[in-house]
Image: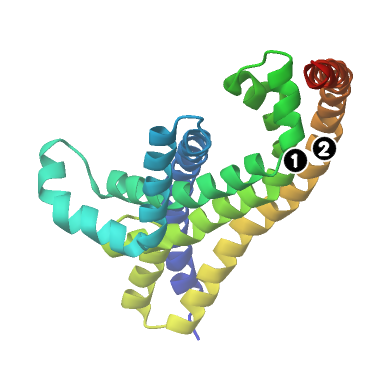
Amino acid sequence: MPGPQVWHQWLELMTKGLWGTLQLSLISSILTILFGAVLAVLAVSPYKIVRGIARGWIEVFRAIPVLAMMILLYFGFGPFAAAFGINAFMIAVVALTLSMSAYQAEIFRGAIRGVPASQWAAASSIGMSHGMTLRRIVVPQVIPPLIPAVVNIVIGVIKLSSLASLITVGELSLSATQAVAISFYPLHVYVLLGCFYAVLILPLIYFSRWLERWTQRRFGLVSAVIDRGLLSQYSDAKEEAELLEEERKLV
């Protein structure tokens, strides 16, 4: 059994690796959400060329594993990147962002497409542009159901950040490998590693549940108000359109 000195040594290494994992996961998660949102908006663009490019980008990066992306960027472009001061940590951030934002974009796109077509028609009938419809009608409705999915993506980023140890990024998995190398207690070290990841991820799960309830209370009311206002205007526009159609038939 490892003694107290060995445990102390492990904890020092794992704490140092924990800071690296937090930095890598936080930066990658923020960039993933932002870039994924941009890709999703482009993927539902009314312009066919923009929509096709965005969807092609999403499909390509969904097909490439994160590990393959890291290896490609680090060993393929690493020498060139080093000349511009780009280190392994930055390469890991780019690889995680490119891969995970594609999944995030597809989740966002599916949520946007899930809004009934009648609401898009209602917004169009009162002169709202595509962008204004997204901001004022669609986004407030899709935020609550998207929260668990976004948190799951963040959890996935935290887990996949462990792959960065293969390109020498100092994070939890690399610290665990170093701890095993100096003590030869793999079982104890990797159980400790699992505990560190559980401490990181479990609070996110409970936070997601609380945030989902809070967002539904706040944004659910806003969406309801917007929908009622649009419904009355849409009904008037629909009645007017039906009357015009009947007049054309009579003529």
Instruction: Please name the residue shown 50% across and 52% down the image.
Output: 103
Mark 2 = which residue?
A: 216
Comparing 53 with 147, the one in front is 53
First in sequence: mark 2 vs mark 1: 1
Q: Residue furthest bottom?
A: 1
- Which image quarter: residue 134? top right
Q: Looking at numbered disc 1 in the image, what kind of residue is underneath it?
A: Pro
Name the spot of residue 45 as percent of width and height, x first: 50, 32
Q: How is the image coloured?
A: rainbow
Q: Looking at numbered disc 2 in the image, what kind of residue is underneath it?
A: Gln
Q: Residue furthest front?
A: 251
Marks 2 & 1, CB-CB < 8 Å contact: yes
The kind of secondary structure element at disc 2 is helix
Comparing 70 with 125, the one in front is 125
Label 2, label 1: how far apart the Cα atoms are:
6 Å
Q: In the drawing, does residue 176 fall left or right of residue 146? A: left
| 23 versus 119 height, above or below | below
Local crowd size for mark 2, using a 10 Å CA cut-off: few (<14), some (14–19), many (≥20): some
Q: In the drawing, does residue 37 fall left or right of residue 98? A: right
Mark 1 = which residue?
A: 144
